[in-house]
Image (cartoon, rainbow, N blue to C red):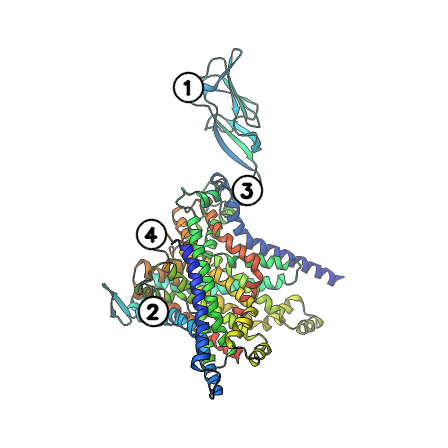
Amino acid sequence: MHAVRTQSTLKWTVHLSVLFLVALWIFPTTGLFVSSFRTVDQISSGGWWASMLSAEQNLVVRAAKPSSQVQDGNLYVIEGDLFAADKGMVISAWGISSKAIGAYKPNQFAELRKGGRITVTADGHFRMVNSEPFIGSRGQRIFFTAQVPPEFTLANYHEMLFDSSNIDGMAGAFLATMTVTVPATIIPILIAAFAAYALAWMRFPGRAMLIAVVVGLLVVPLQLALIPLLKLHMNIGIGKGYIGVWLAHTGFGLPLAIYLLRNYMAGLPRDIIENARVDGATEFQIFTRIILPLSYPALASFAIFQFLWTWNDLLVAKVFLIDATGQTIVMTAKIVELLGTYGGNWEILATSAFVSIAVPLAVFFTLQKYLVRGLLAGSVK
Amino acid sequence: MHPSVQGIVTIVVGITTCVTYFYVSNWVLDHVLFPAKGPKTGRNINRANMVRPWLFLAPALAALGLYLAYPIVETLYLSLTERLPGNEYRWAGLDNYRQMLDDPKFSEALVNNLLWLLVVPAFSTAFGLLAAQLTDRIGWGNIAKSIIFMPMAISFVGASVIWKLVYDAKPAGEAQIGVLNALYVGITHNDPQTWLTIMPWNSFLLMVVLIWIQTGFAMVILSAALRGIPEETIEAAVVDGANPFQIFFKIKVPQIIPTILVVWTTITVTVLKVFDIVFAMTNGQWETQVLANYMFDKLFRANDWGVGSAAAMVIMLLVTPILFLNIRNARREID
């Protein structure tokens, strides 16, 4: 009995600990995600975690202008609604002076300073009554405290992606990132695959040393390459631009590509290759017809790594791509720029960050299997 | 030409060039240089097979040499020279290194980097091990794993924005939208803090971002290692009456020490290269500088290639032990 009870306590502890860990891990991302669907006012009115519940907000609205008054018997009346009925807001208190914004309950009457009385109902209908005509050109200010139900909007995304008048929009940067990523992912694969095949299945002097060199280059910080390569690109006339960034990403991605693919190819069954050789297939045929199709999982793993890495990269793009015109700015660099200019405008920051995060996350959740395989094969054991 | 069109053209040209190169060079080798017919058939086949690996390797070796090997030498050279106006270089010996050592920002970066090197791998590995062990035992473990692994897909810049919101501070009296300040104000009733400016804790708050990202990596690798442990060893321990904690710490962990080391060293390398987080969140202000960002500062803001390259060499030097360790391990595995 006792053992059973400890077992089930342990089980519950495990479930709760994992739940806690998962909550801790997803909480920060959720915060940014939720914030990207809120308006400026909502974001500053309170933490995003409260956005799922209705929140109490203090608002101020101007009533209709005196020019809209109508005569009802011998009374002059101004009527209207403080907010649209479908908003579902409920007023708990209201007032007509900024010094006492919650002086009255719904349906109570307040004396207006310039004569007459006003009342506001809980659903936002107000009615001002006076025995003489209302004068002045501006409407009466009405302060009210209301329970505002949760509300989310796509306006931020619309503004950051599709509003062509917004100079801080992300559409251009999105295209630039795309333009960097696709060639930088595809080009290294082929180069690496041939090299990996040679290192896995051909016998030649110096093979072991070359594998060691590739393993060594895996950890060389690319920081070392920045200035020498930028100098080189300037000297041979590539300068800063897409060609330069594609070449750089290709070079930096090759060690991992060769290493991953070699490990995978070396694990393919020897018989297949030997049989093909006996049957008179050339090495080129063996490679293109047998090895390449069989290595598809490893190719996919590397492609995902390289895609995530180039999509998320900031340093290589800053050094080899983005020039003074800023035409080719990628999303990561754009976000850093926005962090500098709009440090506190979370509707802009959250939305632009999520535009850039969305694609890798989609890739991650659909192709996670290959990513895990690649990690397991790619970490030097 | 629009860049995206240029991109497609580049893909097509790149792939066609590659395929053509491999096809043509192999064809020339087999049909022109060493044809597998006539009186010298045997010798020709052998010779062709000696040359072929190098045909397959040539493009990769050229790219690796140019983009990774040559820059190491060039950076070393740059770190020992001074750039003069008009693209001239003057031998400076160790002057750049001396100048760097005298720079208080450099020692700050070095100290911070050493802290990063201790804290980030330790916590990432520990959390990863914990997550791996716990999620392996429950039904919804794979979903939990996905969520903990997810930050790996998020860019360092994206993660910086995510965590900046967590650390956000509004003036006292206003509603706090950063969860850290909301908790802090709610519990202590003190004024909210601008966390990223408070030394020395701000460095640790930046490390949290990387730990958050790297834990998933550690978890995936360690989870596979835990599953690879032979069942008999665990069963034997259960029979002997070991409790779950003893099984974990005395039976499981000792068996996966090599994998833990791999995870640790891999994260160490990541830490040394990490630049984006500091660049995006504090840009090295308030004593949060690290080597990678210091180097970027020198190279591209101060335009001081000598000291910048010297800083890059320091990063290289710190990576070197791991480089040799990896090579040794890889050789052992291949042989």
Query: Residue at label 4?
Result: A325
User: Which residue bears the numbered disc 1?
Assistant: A136
Would you say the residues marked 1 and 2 are in contact, meaning their CB atoms lie under 8 Å apart?
no
Tell which tag, 3 or 2, sits nearer the viewer. 2
The residues tagged by marks 1 and 4 sit, at their Cα atoms, a distance apart of: 53 Å
The disc labelled 2 sits on which kind of residue? Thr
**Closest to the observer, A17 or B245:** A17
Q: Which residue is mark 2?
A: B75
- Closer to the eye: label 1 or 2: 2
Which amino acid type corresponds to the residue marked 3 in the rendered image? Ser
Marking on residue B132? none
**Left or right of residue A126, residue A238 in this image:** left
Q: Are marks 4 and 2 in contact (CB under 8 Å)?
A: no
Residue B30 position (above or below residue B89): below
Give the spatial CA distance, label 1 vs label 3: 40 Å
Query: Are both tags, 1 and 4, on one chain?
Result: yes
Residue contact at pointers 1 and 4, CB within 8 angstroms: no
Name the amino acid, label 1: Gly
Give the Cα distance between marks 4 and 2: 28 Å
Frontmost residue, A316 versus A83: A316
- Residue A241 coordinates in the image, percent (x, y): 36, 58
Against A109, residue B235 (above or below) is below
Tags 3 and 2 on a common chain: no
Q: CA distance from mark 3 to mark 2?
A: 52 Å
Q: Are marks 4 and 2 on the same chain?
A: no
Residue B42 coordinates in the image, percent (x, y): 49, 87
Q: Earlier in the sequence, mark 1 or mark 3?
A: 3
| Tags 1 and 3 both on a single chain | yes
The residue identified by callout 3 is: A51
Callout 1: chain: A
